[in-house]
Image: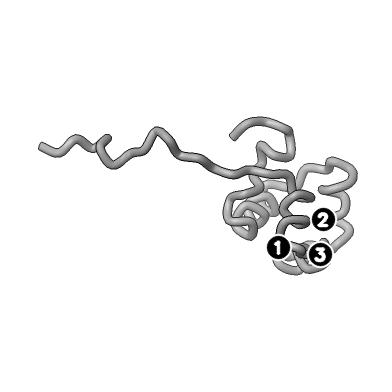
Amino acid sequence: MKNPLESVSIYTYEVHMRLQDYLAETGMTRAEFARRIGVKHISVTRYVNEGRVPEPSVMEKIIEATEGKVTANDFFGLAA
């Protein structure tokens, strides 16, 4: 019988970052990112500058748009 844990790596490394760092890394403007996730650009500015936390539905879109590089924990400064 095959051990199901054989294919699981304990050395998984995931990169997480704040939204402003993601935008800087990708060169994407706040307006472009806002269009991508379906919000107004002022909302993205508030997430970045004012520390506003997105609603859960928007958070899901941020996670998807950033391919998991920005997560809910990143808005609270928590480890993944």
Q: Are marks 2 and 3 in contact (CB under 8 Å)?
A: no
Which image quadrant is residue 64 in?
A: bottom right
Residue identifier under label 1: 37
The local secondary structure at tag 1 comes to helix
Which amino acid is tagged 2? Val
Of mark 2 and mark 3, the one earlier in the sequence is 3
Which amino acid is tagged 3? Thr
**Residue 73 placement (x, y as % from top left):** 66, 37
Nearer-the-camera pick, 42 or 27: 27
Of mark 3 and mark 1, the one earlier in the sequence is 3
Residue identifier under label 2: 44
Give the CA separation, mark 2 to mark 3: 10 Å
Give the CA separation, mark 3 to mark 1: 13 Å
Q: Is residue 62 above or below residue 34?
A: above
The local secondary structure at tag 2 comes to helix
Q: Residue at x 27, y 35 (%)?
A: 5
Q: Is residue 44 left or right of residue 71?
A: right
Q: Is residue 3 above or below residue 58?
A: above
Q: Nearer the viewer, mark 3 or mark 1?
A: 3
